[in-house]
């Protein structure tokens, strides 16, 4: 695949358009630019444009890079899809109603839930390991956000970078995010099948392959 970072323009709107085109080239999916009045503290942001995808296909699309933005401190972030909604997954897989919410953002709480929902904690540990392995291999900074709707996020310290360098780093980190997401999906599918075999239930997912 040819790099989209060879030619740059100083116009900031042109830069964001280049980021949008880069994501579309890497994923094969449509993206849109967030309007300035909706940025809420970011310099720019792009997102997967569901309006350009049929309703039937929306539920089938799973993205390792659904959103990206740059904050006012010069940090660029790339976010994956949510894995699933934790409380729904727990109910359908274990038949118990819990309000986990964002408790699992604190790893000390993982042991608190392990006895009741061991498979869920094992999945989060697997996701964390997959991210750490990717970071060790590629020098990225992918982290697991283990809130109510878990996802991966990687961050780039782009303060002082030229626009050309920013695009190259966005491209590099996004490629690693996509690879990491693919490995996570393989792991998650394995856990899901094991859960179905043991419990006779299948969990709902926010996005299906």
Image (spheres, rainbow, N blue to C red):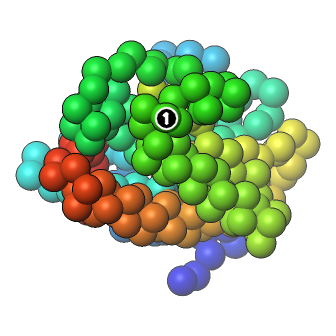
Eyeballing the image, is 177 above or below 59? below
Which of the pair 98/30 is nearer the observer?
98
Is residue 10 left or right of 149 when viewed as pictured? right
Eyeballing the image, is 78 above or below 168? above
Q: Quadrant of residue 62?
A: bottom left
Is residue 151 left or right of 4 when viewed as pictured? left
x and y percentages locating residue 90 in the rendered image: 32, 34
Eyeballing the image, is 147 above or below 170? above
Q: Quadrant of residue 60?
A: bottom left
Eyeballing the image, is 6 above or below 2? above
Is residue 51 left or right of 186 when viewed as pictured? left
Which of the pair 117/203 is nearer the observer?
117
Question: For the point 62% across and 61% down, which residue is it?
Answer: 130
Question: For the point 49% across and 51% down, which residue is it?
Answer: 123
x and y percentages locating residue 183 in the rendered image: 51, 68
Quadrant where the N terminus sits is bottom right
Question: For the point 43% across and 32% down, which residue is it?
Answer: 116
Outermost right residue? 160
Q: Quadrant of residue 98?
A: top left
Which of the pair 165/152 is nearer the observer?
152
x and y percentages locating residue 73 in the rendered image: 81, 27
Which of the pair 56/127 is nearer the observer?
127
x and y percentages locating residue 44 in the rendered image: 59, 33
Dot 1 crowding, Cα within 10 Å, few <14, some 14–19, many 20+: few
Residue tagged 1? 115
Outermost front residue? 115
């Amino acid at each position: 695949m040819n790099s989209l970072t060879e030619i740059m323009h100083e116009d900031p709107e042109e830069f964001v358009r280049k980021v949008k085109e880069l994501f579309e080239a890497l994923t094969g999916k449509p993206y849109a630019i967030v309007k300035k009045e909706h940025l809420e503290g970011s310099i720019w942001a792009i997102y997967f444009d569901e309006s350009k995808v049929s309703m039937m296909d929306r539920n089938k699309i799973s993205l390792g890079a659904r959103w990206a933005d740059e904050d006012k401190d010069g940090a660029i972030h790339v976010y994956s899809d949510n894995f699933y909604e934790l409380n729904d997954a727990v109910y359908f897989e274990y038949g118990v109603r819990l309000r986990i919410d964002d408790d699992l953002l604190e790893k000390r709480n993982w042991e608190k839930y392990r006895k009741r929902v061991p498979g869920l904690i094992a999945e989060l540990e697997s996701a964390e390991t997959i991210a750490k392995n990717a970071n060790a291999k590629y020098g990225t900074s992918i982290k697991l956000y283990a809130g109510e709707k878990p996802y991966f996020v990687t961050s780039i310290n782009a303060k002082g970078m030229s626009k050309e360098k920013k695009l190259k780093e966005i491209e590099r980190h996004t490629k690693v995010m996509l690879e990491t997401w693919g490995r996570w999906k393989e792991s998650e599918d394995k856990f899901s099948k094991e859960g179905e075999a043991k419990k006779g239930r299948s969990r709902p997912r926010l996005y299906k392959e």
